[in-house]
Amino acid sequence: MADAASQVLLGSGLTILSQPLMYVKVLIQVGYEPLAPTVGRNIFGRQVCQLPGLFCYAQHIASIDGKRGLFTGLTPRLCSGVLGTVVHGKVLQHYQERDKAEESGSGNVQKEVSSSFDRVIKETTREMMARSAATLITHPFHVITLRSMVQFIGRESKYCGLCDSIVTIYREEGILGFFAGLIPRLLGDIISLWLCNSLAYLVNTYALDSGVSTMNEMKSYSQAVTGFFASMLTYPFVLVSNLMAVNNCGLAGGCPPYAPMYSSWIDCWCMLQKEGNMSRGNSLFFRKVPFGKTYCCDLRMLI
């Protein structure tokens, strides 16, 4: 119980600290660029045309809505984090209790020792089920979080309160509205998890020497590196999921003429791939201007 409470508190703290970063990231993902590009230098020292980074973007938001505005969408995101942590822990606890029941039921019967790869498959499958359950239950809060952020573009106030947002989505879109963008989000989580654990297993088994004294430390590093690599490869699923969550929701940032309407998440994926925007929002610091792309500094210029 104490472990669950500490996880909730730690997760809530990290959510609060990272809220401005996520706010900026979401606005960039939907293609909102209110600031003109500036001339900067890349890592090789060459002058390039760059889009404003995280701090300039956050300063622009704060100049309009104040510093408090950087925490728009925090309430539903906190609800999502707390509920997701609880559900994730309950699912894993269920599997642990089932293992204990099987061990006690088998008595003194010697169980066959499974291989390390079988254990990886078993643990990854359970983690996948726990994460999927948490994502499924918390996705409505995720949708509300994204829409409350995106309404900054058109200066709307449609998704201000948690209860009002729930009523609005249900009235306009029904139950399915709470699960907009769920499929690519689930696929991204599952692929990322299996890719991360599989790569970590291969590295720890075949690349690291088991005789090294710092073996456990090296394995933890390899897990972190493979996790980062997996998240980079599955980022397009995150982008498509967020775009579908705000697509045609009645906000200026999710409707024409500012944003195209997508018939499905596959249509969204194909369009982003065709435009070369599959990594949009992945970087918040060194943001080069896409070739042949122009940005409007004001939403009214697009109408």
Image: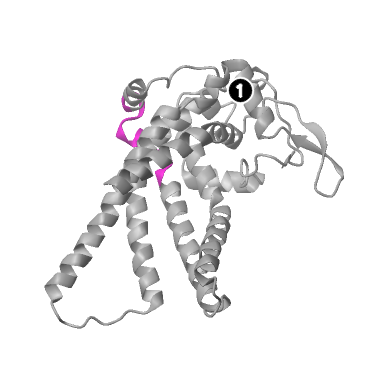
Is 120 included in the stretch rendered in magenta? no
| Location of residue 180 in the rendering, given as x and y in whole percent from the top left corner | 40, 38
Q: Nearer the viewer, residue 93 or 108?
A: 108
State which quadrant residue 213 falls in. Answer: bottom right
Magenta-highlighted residues: 170-182
| Location of residue 201 in the rendering, given as x and y in whole percent from the top left corner | 48, 71
Is 177 included in the stretch rendered in magenta? yes
| Rendered position, 121 above or below 155 | below
Amino acid, disc 1: Ile
Instruction: Decide if residue 255 is in sight here.
Output: no
Q: Nearer the viewer, residue 295 or 70?
A: 70
Q: Main secondary structure of the magenta part?
A: helix
| Location of residue 173 in the rendering, given as x and y in whole percent from the top left corner | 35, 29
| Rendered position, 270 above or below 257 | below
State which quadrant residue 176 falls in. Answer: top left
Identify the residue under disc 1.
Answer: 61
Does residue 223 appear to the left or right of 82 in the view shown?
right
Q: Nearer the viewer, residue 195 or 187?
A: 195
> Which color scheme is applied?
one colour
Q: For numbered disc 1, what is the local secondary structure?
A: helix
